[in-house]
Image (cartoon, rainbow, N blue to C red):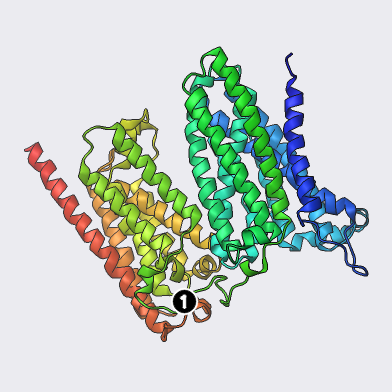
Amino acid sequence: MKVPERVYAGAVVAAGVVVLVVVLRYGGAIEPEIPGLPTAGPVTVWGLPLVRLFSDGCALACVGTLTAACLAPAGSPEGGRCARAAGWWALGWVCTAALGYLATLSDLIPLPVVNLLASPDMLEFGLSIPQTQALLLVAGVALVVAVSAGAPVRARLAVAAFGLLPPAYVGHAASAGDHDLAISALMAHLVPVSVWVGGLAAVLVHFRRSPDLPVVLPRFSAVALCCFAAVTVSGVASAWVRLGTPSDLWRSGYGQLLLAKAAALVLLGLFGWNHRRHTVAGVADRGVRRTFVRLAIGEVTVMAAAVGLAVGLSRTPPPGGGGGHDHLVLEYALAPFSPAALVTEVRLDPALLLLLALAAAGYGAGVRRVPGWPASRTLAFSAGLALAALVLLGGVAGYARAMLSVHALQHAVLTVVSPCLLCLGAPLTLAARATALSPDSWRLPRPRSLMIAYPVGFVLLYVTPWLPWSLSGYAPHVLTELLFLGLGLVVFWVLAGVDPLPRPVPWPARVRLLAVVTAVHVVLGAYLILGPRVGGEWFDLAAPPGVPDVPGDQRLAGAVAMLLPLTALAVLAVRMAWLRMDALARVR
């Protein structure tokens, strides 16, 4: 007998709700009331986790349907249905985020929901609390996704993925012993989980009877494998930061829930292995398609239970040993400085590690698909990634927010040295040969705009309050470094002359751009050596032991900011001159 689809949907939702209720009732997620102290009441105690569960479900469905729309072939009617369905899921996300604002405010004050609704002044109080501010931002982002039905699907997916991140800054990650790594691990966890869980549900709902399933399923299988790896790495990093000792895994309620989530992840890995072995390649066959549907329903049910566990885990306090830090402003422990610590210290940022691993995996896959790819280009790209990893995941990353000289080192590598090597690796040429991408579809700013944007970026960073703001928190610092990395990649895409450009750039324009970039670093180095103090009082507060002279550290930063980029630019100038002479010789 054929079971109605709504029965399957109800079973999936029930799995998440049942697991959440069990965790709340027996897992220690709900703390007992203390006589004489105010309480939010049972409506908030039980309603807040349930609202969070449904909000997470809407977010997963929104991101997942947009992912499925991106994976669908061009002109697929199911892809259009996914894009439209994402708008409705985003609208549900808005409503549940608004309910979450009310329930969270009731829980924090604490005040019963009925009394809170009768006090408009108390409702406005939530505008000053980080937890409720994050929910308002989420609601605003989800509303943008809901009303932007005509926007490109990839842009809507990027906006929806951003909407997953604000709560990461106000949960348990915000109070973990290593604030930066805890937030990074949670960020690297939320987005892959949403793409994986929501994407599978969307493929199951919208494509199970579609003739496009044999195209969509292999694409999603590759994405799901990457998401599984990302979820595993970020989950281990998150547990490492929050747990004081390994024994907390079985001695604390928080650790036991982590073990339950790990078991669910292993089970989901077995589902994925069965998909890749039995259904992905032969899904065009009707019998295999039925097998895929049965496996996918079971997998989505386990995923719903895992989401319930995650919501219960968010309501469970971590063990006491996993929190706290002893630094005044950095919110993570920093050892006394020594030059050797720049190499020996390790800060494995999960989000950045996954981004670098994705770039390396993509380039490696392209090299395997393009026979005869020059080894020199592979070496250049690998060196660029290795240098980026060195300054983003090692001791440089830890001290960059506390010492201007180390910040200058990180900034010079990410803006000049690493982009130069990455562009010499010709990744766009490799992508064009390995896939159906065409250089005509790429967008290139005009060299004149780059000659303006490059110096303006440095002026704004070092002359305005941008620098101390970027050093004051994990997200501002990472966004700033990635912004300058992107600017460097675009500039050296033009200067390196290895990858094809969407339109020709005259040789004099390239020379002028190189001259502007060189002048910027000369002026910056001189400004740091001879000019006023940079960064306000930040470096006085953040400087670790072993830095006796903060003004002297700024002069060292000026030397680094000048000499390291100039060395790379001189090598690039020699290469450009050699290429120009070679081109003229061919013309003659």
Residue 431 shown left or right of residue 110 in the figure: left
- Tell me, yes or no, if residue 156 can be seen here: no
- Quadrant for the N terminus, please: top right
Give above or below for 420 relative to 54.
below
Residue 579 shown left or right of residue 348 in the figure: left
Q: Nearer the viewer, residue 586 or 279?
A: 279
Q: Nearer the viewer, residue 308 or 132?
A: 308
The residue located at (45%, 53%) in the rendering is 353
Which residue is identified by label 1? 335
The residue located at (31%, 32%) in the rendering is 369
Residue 212 shown left or right of residue 106 in the figure: left
Residue 521: percent from the left, percent from the top? 32, 66
Q: Nearer the viewer, residue 167 or 369?
A: 369
Residue 35: percent from the left, percent from the top? 92, 68
Quadrant in the picture for residue 289: top right
Residue 561: percent from the left, percent from the top? 33, 69
Residue 268: percent from the left, percent from the top? 58, 37
- Density class for disc 1 (Cα within 10 Å; few <14, some 14-19, many ≥20) is some
Amino acid type of the residue that numbered disc 1 sits on in the rendered structure: Ala
The residue located at (54%, 46%) in the rendering is 231
The residue located at (65%, 58%) in the rendering is 250
